[in-house]
Image (spheres, rainbow, N blue to C red):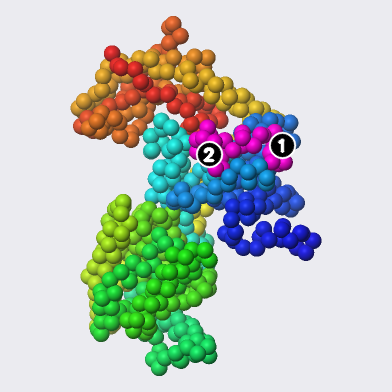
Amino acid sequence: LPENDPASQRITDELYGGGSEERIAQELLLGIGGIRALRALGVNPHVYHLNEGHTVFSTLERTREAMQEGGLSFYEARQATGAGTLFTTHTPVPAGFDLFPEPLIDTYLGDYLEQLDLETEEFMRMGRVNPESRDEDFNVAVLALRQAPRRNAVSRLHRRATARMMQPGWIGFPLGEMPVESVTNGVHTKSWVAPEMQQLYDHYLGPRWQEDASCREAWQRVERIPDLELWHVHTRLRERLVAYAREQAAWRARSQAGAGGLGVPADLPLRPDTLTIGFARRFATYKRATLLFRDVCRLKNLLLDEARPVQLIVAGKAHPRDGAGKDFIREIHDIVNREGLCNHVVFLEDYDLNKAAMLVQGVDVWLNTPRRPNEACGTSGMKVVPNGGLNLSVLDGWWAEAYRPGVGWAIGEGQEFIHADYQDEVDAESLYSTLEREVVPLFYQRDADGIPRGWTAMMKDSIRVLAPAFSGDRMVKQYAECFYLPIADRCWRLTADGFAKAKEFSAWKRRVRKAWSDVRVTWVKGGPVPDMTVGEELEVQAKVHLGTLDPSDVVVQAYFGSLRPDGTLRSGRSVPLVWMGCENEEHLYQGTVPGRASGLHGYAVRVLPCRDDVLVPNELSLIAWEEAERS
Ligand SMILES: *Cc1c(COP(=O)(O)O)cnc(C)c1O
């Protein structure tokens, strides 16, 4: 806006632009400004869903509002706003999070923190993995984890990666108990499916798939579509993509000719009936756009096969500052020119939504080659599914949970190696051999009518199984049921009666934190338990010192599972122990651990803060395990 000063105008100039200073300005505008914009529009939701850490400053603005409204302290108000917040992380590696040094926080947030009654150092602690370590910068994702007791990752595999990143903040908690859940992304089916496919579905599936794309019964009816019809529609879509890619290539050749380039080539690139592989994405290095080009000889054999040729359409954009990503594009370009593959590999410039639609609707195979476990979810492969394309992908992100034989192909076996180059080697080998032995033969195996029956069967399996599971409708339902509704309920309970429960909860948390260093498991009966038989139960007794806390402030559990050779517990399950009485300031607890399977098993007794009416499990990252020798 012209009335803003030049510095303010520049804040929204460029997405992902600039350095930390521009980033923090952008995030403050998004978070604090975003909430103020909603208020100006009269929008006052109960539940706020933070997409990535960049949005986290919105929780500060909401806390400030609640402080004013209820006359609350920051920590009291925060219980209420936290209860109404869901934080979704999309980042698979710690390097993906924004970090801000203290002077920047001070400059940009100093005055604002005063309104929140917070000192800069107090606030810095909320953004450090280890609050005590003063040389740690402020991490917005860490603040988001602390501000939102409900959190989720965007695929099951990404939940594991996120749990590993969170572990330093939950010392003593097993990896399996990190308080983070997962909702795998989905795509908005109707937006991505080609009109011709849409007609086919309307005819054979009925209206249900349009109303609710997560309806499995509707997609079951894919079996009713005659192979011939499915194949003809798909073929038309491939032809359209090829025509489009030719047009683009010709247009580019003409513009280069005008600029003193090589002139328009005599033959048109690509063929309408050739097995067409699509590869399109941001050229982030972990996506390994050049994996298929690793062994040029083997790639040429695939592309140039007379009887069973393959062609490749590549599209993408590198981040303006991602030099390695830009090198990928250059490398592909160089190989294609040097090896004379221009008619078999086409690069589409300026990847955008329209090009993406054209691609996902027309390809036979969608290739994705991320270096596991770097793909948090990945969505473009899902867009291909209702269009009848088949996925050929590394078992990473969504594909790690979606893949099963018959719905597409897996590259590799889900291994992760320490040495990136070795991983690339193993995955490239798997990619080539899957193409050579499975993908290409199946595509060109035609019956008397020219229909690849094996291929169309696979298309149908992919659509039937994957289209409902990876639809946006499934995702939204899951968010509503697992998060939005319970979060709204909890937020309502904490804000009711002038924030009564928020105040009580805040006071309770403070009391528990202060008292926790005195909480100890002082005695556990018996030793570790070798070779329990299935169905057998084991009695557990423990004595616990709670200091100034009451049994109603905690839960005492036996955590049990199989033992590693070194005697430590693998991830397991827990059962609550029952309070039996108190003697000499020691509380006696008792319960039984079920025998689950043969082999070496063990259990350990632990104490966690607990308050049934308000607490999210593990919300306070406090835990006390038995330490004493057992007798
Ligand atoms: C779907 C899509 C993406 C994201 O694809 P991923 O597989 O999730 O990386 C990026 N850009 C465009 C234009 C898209 O349509």
**Label 1 crowding class (10 Å Cα cut-off): few <14, some 14-19, many 20+?**
few
| Mark 2 lies on residue | 135
What distance separates the C-alpha of mark 1 from that of mark 2? 23 Å
Q: Quadrant of the N terminus?
A: bottom right
Residue stretch rendered in magenta on the structure: 110-138
Residue at the image point whose x is 39% and y is 74% from the top? 332
Q: Is residue 538 visible?
A: yes
Question: Residue 36 in the image: x percent, y percent?
Answer: 72, 49
The residue nearer to you, when weighing 276 against 408, is: 276
The residue under label 2 is which amino acid type?
A: Asp
Query: Going 44% across and 59% down the picture, which residue do you hit?
Result: 378
- Sort mark 2 into few (<14), some (14-19) or many (20+) by Cα contacts within 10 Å: few
Q: Is residue 122 rendered magenta in the image?
A: yes
Farthest right residue in view: 3
> How many numbered discs, if any?
2
Tag 1 residue: 114
- Which amino acid lies under the numbered mark 1 shown in the image of this protein? Glu
Q: Is residue 82 left or right of residue 290?
A: right
183, above or below 622, in the image = below
* Foreground pick, 484 / 35: 35
The C terminus sits in image quarter: top left
User: Does residue 194 appear in this view?
Assistant: no
